Image (cartoon, helix red, strand yellow):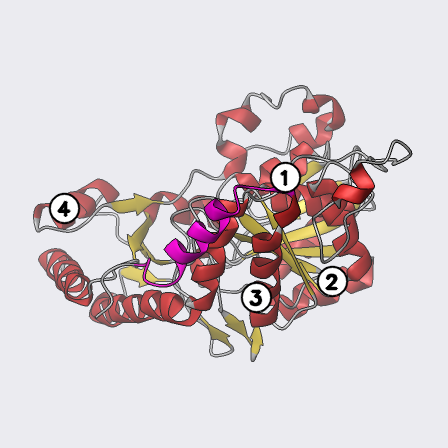
Amino acid sequence: MLTNRIFGNELKYLEEVLESGFRASSGASMMQRFEKAFASKFDVSHGVAFVNGTATMHAALEAWGIGSGDEVIVPPMTMASTTFAVLQCNATPIFADIDPKTFQICSNSIAENITNKTKAIITVALFGLSPDMDPIMALARKHGLKVLEDNAECFLGEYKGRLAGTIGDCASYSLQNSKHLTSGEGGIVITNDEEFAVKLRKIASLGYSGVSATSGKVTRQEIQSPDYFRHVSLGWNYRMPELCCAVALAQVENIDTLVKRRKDVGELFSEVVRPFRQWFVPQSTPSYAVHSYWTFAAYLARDDITWYELREKFASLGGDGVYACWKLTYKEPFLANMEVLGREQFISQRNIDKYQTGICPVAESLQPRMFMFKTNYWDWQKALSQAEILSETLSHFA
């Protein structure tokens, strides 16, 4: 019986790293094993590991040459890291509204926000569901834009029979502790573009000349030479530590089981709320998609009950913590007050003036009403209990 998300080779692989004494000769072998296993699972050519799932996106944008004066379209309803990555490149985030049923970035709103300065689109598979990618990719190809799939919340989700993350030019995954797979911290970018993968690796590895799409290791023979030119470009120290890679590798080996549990819990909650769907509206999963349920999301479509009243009733009956949806990114103080560490100089006044209430009305309507319920229950009896408590909570207000 599954009672914990750590049940594979995590300890074994950690011991391998520790027994190596972190010798230079052992290089980044665990990282290479993790990257290869992850890329193989998604049937792509390359995986490049990073210290976290924000560095992944920053590096991808840098590798595409995105910078000052460029615009990147992002959704407003998600963790602010998606926007941070754009600002870290000195580029300008532009917010497109969301679909009222799926809560995903809307292709029509993307189209309305494309300008001659737009260089990329970052989609977010929010809560574990892929956006409608075909029209987004059509727009990207028409306008010559890059597409980065932020799949931090979506492992093994599907879109029209394809794995989410294999549709755009690249995809970013997070291994932070709340995600389907975790190594405490970490991230990875997957792609089929070898030239892009090489650029990613150099950005992640201090611009070292000796790294490649498949290797983050610089050999001792190279680096000990007085004639060796180490740094061929600017880069960051974004490499994922070997200890984290060891845990991540073990998690990849059990990815199907880990994701299935979240999907099972999400589907359980979906059934529980079915009788109340008219006023407690769950995220809609289109027939073309397979949801991976990082969380189970729904919004309250009644004005006679407050978000807090429903949350407090759920808690009083023994419900676990319920998460509210993030404040829309453009309403967060860092953008509202332009506290962006000097990067305001790269954003036109016209775009600064856009960061106001009214630019994404669908997201603005849904965000204060949104509930996010945990799906990471490794004890199935606990999941059943929480589903029953949710049912009792909704029945109380019916």
Q: Amino acid at mark 2?
A: Leu
On the image, which quarter does residue 140 sit in? bottom right
Q: Position of residue 223 (x, y in %)?
A: 79, 38
Q: Position of residue 221 (x, y in %)?
A: 80, 43
Please give the residue where the numbered disc 1 appears in the rendered image.
238
Q: Amino acid at mark 3?
A: Ala
Seen from the viewer's position, the closer of residues 140 and 62 is 62
Q: CA distance from mark 1 to mark 2?
A: 31 Å
Q: CA distance from mark 3 to mark 2?
A: 32 Å
Quadrant where the C terminus sits is bottom left
On the image, which quarter does residue 192 sit in? bottom right
Mark 4 or 3: in front is 3
Q: Amino acid at mark 4?
A: Ala
Decide which of tag 4 and tag 1 comes sooner along the chain.
1
Please give the residue where the numbered disc 3 appears in the rendered image.
37
Label 2: which secondary element? helix
Mark 3 or 2: in front is 3
Quadrant where the N terminus sits is bottom left
Please give the residue where the numbered disc 4 appears in the rendered image.
315
Decide which of tag 4 and tag 3 comes sooner along the chain.
3
Decide which of tag 3 and tag 2 comes sooner along the chain.
3
What range is drawn magenta here?
5-24
Please give the label number shown on residue 74.
none
The reply to whether residue 145 is in sight is no
Label 3: which secondary element? helix
In the image, residue 6 lies in the stretch drawn in magenta: yes
Please give the label number shown on residue 139.
2
Seen from the viewer's position, the closer of residues 168 and 33 is 33
The reply to whether residue 327 is in sight is yes
